[in-house]
Image (cartoon, coloured by chain):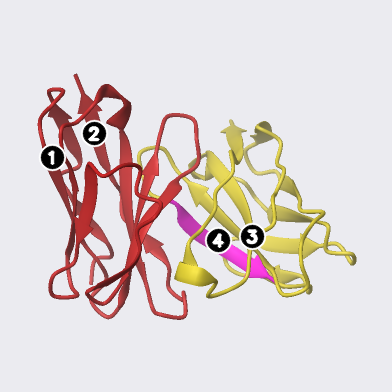
Chain colours: A yellow, B red
């Protein structure tokens, strides 16, 4: 699985959009970008994933650059409950064992 | 179905003791995974099962770690002769074979004193 780079921490004001970047310059053509988040004392929670097109669901939007070397997770209206560590993972779906390789993630602090 | 359940949520044990954690996956999921997470780090994959077969165990941290899933439903993770370095959160997850529906439990936090 390709390596990812994320800023260790970010702040966001409540109600504003949170834009979390991820660099994955060594991504292969068949690798998808996945985002998970982990709220304190809970297990990671799936947010969204995509291959090359932008994706949106009820939780977030995922913007992938045309060269696929980076992506941005957007939480359109951040709330205090979005305070968590956000992990960007690049992998081939159903890779050997479906194991997920987590980096250090970005600790997002949403402030009132 | 209430998701992936792990028991206990917290465990404090003395160094040298054996501990066992239990994971109940989502019932229709046939894959089950164990991860370990130390403070400030992302989760680290340990092992996984397809039904009752353990298909990957090379990433278990030492021979003191073992996992079972005897009937293809719940799983246990055992650590023998615990050491202080084993203190961590142990996470369980389950999914369909394709990886769809990948869901984590809330973990068992182990403290070795």
Q: Are marks 3 and 2 in contact (CB under 8 Å)?
A: no
The x, y position of residue A64, in whole percent, is 80, 63
- Same subunit, labels 2 and 4: the answer reads no
The residue under label 3 is A1
- Same subunit, labels 1 and 4: the answer reads no
Q: Are marks 4 and 3 in contact (CB under 8 Å)?
A: no
The residue under label 1 is B19
State left or right for residue B99 relative to residue B95: right
Q: Are marks 1 and 2 in contact (CB under 8 Å)?
A: yes
Query: Which chain is indicated by disc 1?
Result: B
Which label number is shown at residue B110? 2
| Mark 2 or 4: the one toward you | 2
Relative to A27, is B18 above or below?
above
Query: Which chain is indicated by disc 2?
Result: B
- Same subunit, labels 3 and 2: the answer reads no
- Disc 4 packing (10 Å; few <14; some 14–19; many ≥20): some
Relative to B110, is B5 above or below?
below
SS label for mark 1: strand
């Amino acid at each position: 699985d390709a390596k990812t780079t994320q800023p260790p921490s970010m702040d966001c004001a409540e109600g504003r959009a949170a834009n979390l970047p991820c660099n994955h310059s060594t991504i292969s053509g068949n690798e998808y970008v996945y985002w998970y988040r982990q709220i304190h004392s809970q297990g990671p929670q799936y947010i969204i994933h995509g291959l090359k097109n932008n994706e949106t669901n009820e939780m977030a939007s995922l913007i992938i650059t045309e060269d696929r070397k980076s992506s941005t997770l957007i939480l359109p209206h951040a709330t205090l409950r979005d305070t968590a560590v956000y992990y960007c993972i690049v992998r081939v779906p159903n890779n050997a064992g479906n194991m997920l390789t987590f980096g250090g993630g970005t600790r997002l602090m949403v402030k009132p | 179905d209430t998701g992936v359940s792990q028991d206990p949520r917290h465990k404090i044990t003395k160094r040298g003791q054996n501990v066992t954690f239990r994971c109940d996956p989502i019932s229709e999921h046939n894959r089950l995974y164990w991860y370990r997470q130390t403070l400030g780090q992302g989760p680290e994959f340990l092992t996984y099962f397809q039904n009752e077969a353990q298909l990957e165990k090379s990433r278990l941290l030492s021979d003191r770690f073992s996992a079972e899933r005897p009937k293809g439903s719940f799983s246990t993770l055992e650590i023998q002769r615990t050491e202080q370095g084993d203190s961590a959160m142990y996470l369980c997850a389950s999914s369909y074979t394709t990886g769809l529906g990948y869901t984590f439990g809330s973990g068992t936090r182990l403290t070795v004193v």
